[in-house]
Amino acid sequence: MLTFGPDQFYFLLQGLKWTLLLSAISFVGGGVIGLLVALARTSGIGALQGITRGYIAVFQGTPLLMQLFVIFYGVALLDVSTDPWMAVALAFTAHASAFLGDIWRGSIEAVPRGQTQAARALGLGYIARMRDIVLPQALKISLPATIGFLVQLIKGTSLAAIVGFVELARAGQIISNLIFQPLLVFGIVGLIYFAVCWPLSLLGDRAERMLAAGSR
């Protein structure tokens, strides 16, 4: 009978590699789209605000698991061949863009309006105002919430197993089915998740304390 050993642990690390890669791609891609969503939500243009408000509502108001199913099987209905990796990357990127867009929208709106008005009085255009004045301050404000969302995103990648993507949680399930030691295997999986997410949570707490101290 098989037992948990170096080969099984290496297989878990392979799953962790895909978990971290999926999280990184989703976070970066979602961040780029989320920034555009946040700018559109605060643009003052009614059509853009309405579209992005609906976009955020759809992804925040539906389960991530359902989004994975819709994107994975929806792409197949279009006669476009895709693998689980592409499907989950697209689904998690869209999911992240909606949440990050809303987080950053709130941070942009939290920047005192007096600074924007002063920038307008100095003749700064929209791009210069956002780049040099608004966004740097909004980034600091949003940092704790952004890090908190990244932690949730890493843990949420475990749902990708539903469409056949082998990440950390799925790797643990495969090993558990082989050696029949679920408590041991998933205990190790949990410790790996903790080792990845706990430092990020501490970083978010530290950023929040520094932000609170700086606002006094």
Image (spheres, rainbow, N blue to C red):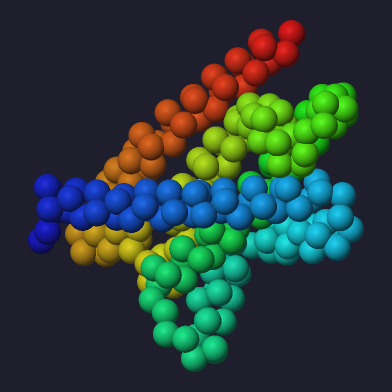
Q: Is residue 194 above or below residue 155?
A: above
Residue 21 place in picture, x, y as percent: 37, 52
Quarter where residue 118 is shown: top right
Residue 152 place in picture, x, y as percent: 54, 45
Q: Is residue 29 left or right of residue 212?
A: left
Q: Nearer the viewer, residue 106 or 19?
A: 106
Residue drawn where x is 66% and y is 10% of the image: 213
Q: Is residue 51 left or right of residue 210?
A: right
Q: How many marks?
A: 0
Residue 160 place in picture, x, y as percent: 45, 63
Residue 164 place in picture, x, y as percent: 38, 71
Quarter holding the C terminus is top right
Residue drawn where x is 53% and y is 81% of the image: 75
Residue 165 visible? The answer is yes
Quarter where residue 171 is shown: bottom left
Residue 168 visible? The answer is no
Q: Nearer the viewer, residue 168 or 136?
A: 136
Residue found farthest to the front: 123
Residue drawn where x is 29% and y is 43% of the image: 188
Q: Is residue 206 left or right of residue 98?
A: left
Q: Nearer the viewer, residue 18 or 129?
A: 129
Q: Is residue 10 above or below residue 88?
A: above
Quarter holding the N terminus is bottom left
Residue drawn where x is 76% and y is 59% of the image: 52
